[in-house]
Each structure stands twice: as C-alpha cells, then as structure tokens.
Image: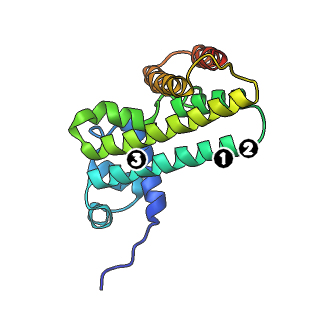
Amino acid sequence: MGRPMQFETDTAVDRAMDLFWRQGYAGTTPQELATELGIGKGSLYNTFESKHALFIRALRRYSEMRLEYLTDLFSAPGPVRPRLKGAMTVLAGVGEHQRGCVMVNAAAELGTGDDDVNRIADNLFARIEAVFRQAIVQGRESGEFSMDRDAETAASQLLASVVGLSVLVKAGGPSERFGAVVDGIVDGL
C-alpha cells in the first residue's frame, strides 16, 4: 500500500497552469513544477505521468475556466456591448498581467508539433467564437449592433482580435491602448 496523496490534484493543476503561463512549456522544468506544487518529482510523475500530461490537464482546466466565465457573463441580463468588451479584455489579459492567454501562448509555442495542444486550442477557440456569435445575434436582436455584417464573420474577427491582442499584451505596451482597440472593435459591430 502506497503513501496517501498529500495534495489536492485540482489545486496542483491550477498552480501548474500558472507556472506554465508564466514560463511557457519549454521554460518549465519538472523540478520547477514539483517545487511549485510542493511535492517531490516522484509524486509529480506518479500523479500526472509526465510534464506533458500535466500541461495538457492544465490547458483543459484553463479552457473550462474560460468557458465557465463566458457562460456566466453572457447568461447575465443587460446590454451585450459592455459584456462583449469585458470578455475580449479578460480573454486577452488586457490590464491584468503581461502574460497574454495561456492557450494562445501554448499554440504559438508548440504549434503544429503537438496534436493534443492543437485539439484543445481549436476546441476552445471554436467555442469562444460560438459564444461571440451568439452574443452578436443577441446584440442585434436588442438593437445594439447593426445587421450589416454576417454574425459568423464578425465572431471570427472578434476571436482573431482576441488572439492578436493576447500576443500584444504578452509583448508589453500600455493597457489603455489595448482597451481602446477593444472599444473600437466592439463599437464597429
């Protein structure tokens, strides 16, 4: 009989996600993960199998968190425009930190070389785009947005803007500038 687990795995995944977000996948060593989680490397491997498996769990957790946030945000009553601006701001990390979006970072770092990362990123991006599309439709129904552009195309443009803003946030720069960009994009709907 092995020793009982001395840590909460969900908390460990959240802490690992934060470390990967700060340092990237390649820049994070198994020893740094074990130290961040307050466990030994043996426990790290026994629980999560590998650094990559923990990274995948962290990306899945990040996706869940982002989708929960969007669901809560867009199920609340009120005008769509400020909620859409808020969603874009949060998703890109504007004003919060200079880390951008962990999913954008992972996709950029590992790109076509990691099918697991690509599947998770594609799924999250598609679901964000679907939320944006529904928000645009809702905004049109309430009279906040014009009917000039196709909702599908507009949602794709919003997603592309979030991804681009995330990269700009990671590169640094004044958050006021990025806030103005979000305002302009959403006001253009």
Task: Determine which quarter of the picture holds residue 37.
Answer: bottom left
Q: Amino acid at mark 3?
A: Leu
Left or right: 79 with respect to 32?
Answer: right
Q: Is residue 78 left or right of residue 95?
A: right
Q: Position of residue 136 (x, y in %)?
A: 63, 29
Q: Which residue is at a point 69% across and 22% down the rendered structure image?
A: 145
Could you say where residue 83 lies in the image, as x and y percent from the top left?
Answer: 68, 32
Question: Which residue matches tag 3?
Answer: 59
The residue that mark 2 highlights is 76
Q: Quadrant of the N terminus?
A: bottom left
Q: CA distance from mark 3 to mark 2?
A: 26 Å
Foreground of the two, 175 or 67: 67
- Is label 2 in a helix, a strand or a loop? loop
Verify CB contact (< 8 Å) between mark 3 and mark 2. no
The quadrant holding residue 149 is: top right
Q: Is residue 169 left or right of residue 51?
A: right
Badge 1 is on which residue? 72
Q: Is residue 124 left or right of residue 79?
A: left
Is disc 1 placed on a helix, strand or loop?
Answer: helix
Kindly check if marks 2 and 1 are in contact, taking CB atoms under 8 A apart as contact: yes
The answer for how far apart the CA atoms under marks 2 and 1 are is 6 Å
In terms of secondary structure, where does tag 3 sit? helix
Mark positioned earlier in the residue sequence (3 or 2) = 3
Furthest residue to the left? 113
Q: Residues within 10 Å of mark 3 (few under 14, many from 20)?
A: many
Q: Residue at image x 72%, y 30%?
A: 141
Q: Dot 2: few (<14), some (14–19), or many (≥20) neighbours within 10 Å? A: few
Q: Nearer the viewer, mark 3 or mark 2?
A: 2
Quarter of the rendering containing residue 79: top right
